[in-house]
Structure formats: C-alpha cells, structure tokens
Amino acid sequence: MHALFALFYLQASGGFGNLGLLLPVLLIGMVLLTAIPNQRKQKKWNEMLEKLKAGDRVATTGGIRGVIVSLKDDAVVVRTQPDGVKIEFLKSAIASVTTEEEAEK
C-alpha cells in the first residue's frame, strides 16, 4: 500500500516525467487483459451448466464423479459408482462434463 502512495507522490511531483502520464493507462490495460479471459471462462462454464441433462457424466469441484440421474432448478442428483449411491449437488458444484465420446476413449 505504501508503494502505491509513493508511486502517486512521484507522479504528482513529476518524478516520472512522461511515464507518469502513461502509468494509469498501463494499469487499466493490465486490469482489462486479466478480466476479459475470466469473463469468457465464466460464460463457457455457465453455458455448460445450462446444457446439463440426465445421463451426462460429471465431475464435481470436490472430485466426485458420477452420472446425472435428475435435474432440479439449482441442483442435480448424481449416481456414483460402484454402489450407485445418489447424491444431490448444487449445479454450481459441477466442474466438468464428460461426453459419451470422451468416456469411450
């Protein structure tokens, strides 16, 4: 935090010269460059959650794998192997979906 104040002090006192004018623009650019990929990743994940259907093989963020048995508004019921135990998870806990083609490989 102290470094940030020192940076603004140097900028205000003219210690950076022309770099002081460019620095805020560079900082905003860096923020945008990190935010855009995260937005794309979030959008792709939301689309995956919308396309969930019974029979999809899924993995949760906790590492549990299984097959979706049924869907509710904000939850899914997943059957795990080998005992066929059914567990209900929030849709937001689904980390990935494995399609039938990927499962056969």
Image (spheres, rainbow, N blue to C red):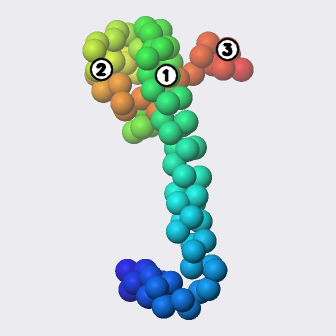
- The x and y percentages for residue 42 are 48, 35
Q: How far apart are the alpha carbons under marks 1 and 2?
A: 15 Å
- Earlier sequence position, callout 1 versus callout 2: 1
Q: Which residue is mark 2?
A: 75
Quadrant location, the C terminus:
top right
- The x and y percentages for residue 22 are 60, 71
Q: Is residue 81 visible?
A: no
* Residue at position x 37%, y 80% in the image: 1
Q: How many marks?
A: 3
- With 104 as the anchor, is 77 left or right in this view? left
Q: Which residue is mark 3?
A: 101
- Earlier sequence position, callout 2 versus callout 3: 2
Q: How far apart are the alpha carbons under marks 1 and 3?
A: 19 Å
- Number of other residues with Cα within 10 Å of mark 3, as a class: few under 14, some 14 to 19, many 20 or more: few
- Number of other residues with Cα within 10 Å of mark 1, as a class: few under 14, some 14 to 19, many 20 or more: few
Q: How far apart are the alpha carbons under marks 2 and 3?
A: 25 Å
Foreground: 19 or 84?
A: 19
Snapshot quadrant of residue 29 = bottom right
* Residue at position x 55%, y 44% in the image: 36
Q: Which residue is mark 1?
A: 47
In the rendered image of this protein, does residue 61 appear above or below residue 28?
A: above
For the residues bearing labels 2 and 3, Cβ distance under 8 angstroms: no
Q: Is residue 91 visible?
A: yes
Which of the two marks, 1 or 3, is nearer to us in this view? 1
In the rendered image of this protein, does residue 56 appear above or below residue 94?
A: above
